[in-house]
Structures are given as structure tokens and as C-alpha cells.
Amino acid sequence: MIWFPLAIGTAFFMATNSAWLKKFFGDVSPWEMAAIPFFYVTPLAAAALFFVDIPEIRPGFYPAMAWVLPLTTVGFILHYRAVSLSPLSLTLPFLSFTPAFVLFTGRLILGEKLSSPGVAGILLIVTGGYVINLDSVRSGWLGPIRAIRREPGSALMLLVAAIYALTSVGGKVILMTSSPLFGAMAQFVLYGVLISLLLIAGGKARLQVILSRPLLGFGSGLCLFAEIICHNLAISMVNAAYMIAIKRTAGIFSVVYGKLLFRESGFRYRLLGTVIMCAGAAVIALWG
């Protein structure tokens, strides 16, 4: 069961990084905010490669890397494009569907089979993650669903959730054909370089802004670095769908940060969503 606290750690560091960026880089553009953690995690991941044993690279590693790397980059770009096109309350709920999609991609690519209680726990987390983001939607629970037809960002984020379902499973193939830590560090050296270059060269992010607060930038990089380690160790130990579902409980930590750091209000949906997600996590931990 060591995978469970590692998955919770993944959720914690993911939410912590988001809160860190919002607190200390809330004045920069969304693209620059997105580039900062990838830029600063690159030297950390590169340095870690010197301390990680190089494993035997088994068949399947390079083919998986060849499609996971570009598809993840596309997913990342579409993610922020969706956020820029439509309100957060009509886009973020759809990321919660990633674990539901992983039910199918995990079985298709990895042949993973899940227990009935495990599937129920995943669906509870999906539901809770959807509800937790609905506090600012005046049209109620079905608001984001209805928005798919009129909001381009909503439909785009649903596509992003499907892409992440593929890349998370493909990422596990990379780990299985190398090792969790080597595969993780190799991926994020490449992600960091590629995403930073694309955003800077494409004029979306300014290098002088990224370098303007180096200590705070490294703080974000450290959060992402810790998330990477927890994520890859956890997903190497358990079905991808379970791990991704627990990772989506980052919404619970986000609610806490929102209250403590930003004095956010409107907790009706957030409290309900948190309770549902906690129930789903408990079901997976006990019977998944």
C-alpha cells in the first residue's frame, strides 16, 4: 500500500505548486506561469540522472517515448489554450474525467483489470472532482456539460483529459521498460527543454520574466520535481487508473489552499466535492 501515500503526495505537490504559482507569479501571463515550473525543473531532473542507476532499456521504451513526448506536449499546449478561451469554471471540471478515460486506456494499452469497488471509487473521485469546480457556475451542475456546444475551451479541455489518459498510461510503459526514477527524469528533462523552447521561441513566454525571480522559480521547480518522483513511483506499483484517480484528489488540497491563502469563498460545491472525492479515495484504498 505504499503507492497510496505516494499518490497522495503527488496530489499534494501538484496542488502546492499551483498555489505557489498563483501566490508568487499571479502577475505574469498564463503561458509564462506554465513555463516556469518546467524551466526550473529541467536542471533538477538533469542533475538527478547522474545519481540514478541507468537500467537496462527494454523493448518498448523508445516507441513509447516517441509518442508520449509529443502528445503530452500537445496536451499541455491545448490545456492552456482551453483556459485562455473559456472561464476556468467551464474548463477545469473536465480534467476530472481523466481517471474515467484511464479505465479504458489502461486496459487497452497495459491490459490492467480493475475490481468493481475500485471502479466505483474512481467514479466517485471523477464526480467529486467535477463538483468541486462548480462553485462559480450559475447554471448548476450541468453548466459545463451544456457549455461544450457554445464554449470552445470546454470541448478542448475534454479532449485534453482524453490525451492525458493516454499519456499517463504511455508514461507507465516508459517506466516499465526502464525504471521509475530513470524514466521520470529522462522524460522531464525532455519536457522541460521542449516546452520552454516552444513557449519562448513562439513568443508566448518571455525569458526575462521567467528569470526575474529565480529563487521563487526554483521553489516551483522543486514542487514539480517532488510531484514527478511521487507520481512515477506510485504509478509503477499499481493500476494506472487507481493512481490517476488518487492524483485528482489534488482538488481537496486546492480547496484548503484557496481558503487559507486566498480567502476564497463559495464553498457549497467545494465542500460537497471534497467529501465525494474523499469517499472515492477511501474505497480505492480499502477495496480497490
Image (spheres, rainbow, N blue to C red):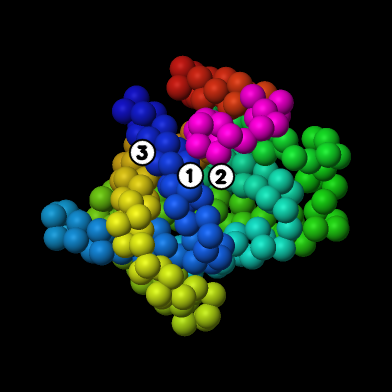
Query: Which stretch did the figure color magenta?
Result: 252-271
Work out whether residue 58 or residue 11 is closer to the camera in this orientation and state it. 11
C-alpha distance separating marks 2 and 1: 26 Å
Residue 257 in magenta?
yes
Amino acid beneath label 3 = Ala
- Secondary structure at badge 3 equals helix
Q: Main secondary structure of the magenta part?
A: helix
Contact between marks 3 and 2 (CB within 8 A): the answer is: no
Q: Earlier in the sequence, mark 3 or mark 2?
A: 2
Amino acid beneath label 2 = Val
Which quadrant is the N terminus positioned in?
Answer: top left
- Secondary structure at badge 2 equals helix
Q: Which mark is residue 234?
A: 3
Q: Which mark is residue 19?
A: 1
Question: Residue 283: horizontal and vertical position, in percent?
Answer: 53, 20
Work out whether residue 73 or residue 30 is closer to the camera in this orientation and state it. 30
Give the vertical position of 173 relative to 115 (above or below).
below
Question: Residue 65: horizontal and vertical position, in percent?
Answer: 39, 65
Between circles 3 and 1, the one closer to the viewer is 1
C-alpha distance separating marks 3 and 2: 15 Å
Say which residue appears at 40% left-offset and 41% top-offset.
13
Mark 2 is surrounded, within 10 Å at the Cα level, by few (under 14), some (14 to 19) or many (20 or more) other residues, namely many
C-alpha distance separating marks 3 and 1: 23 Å
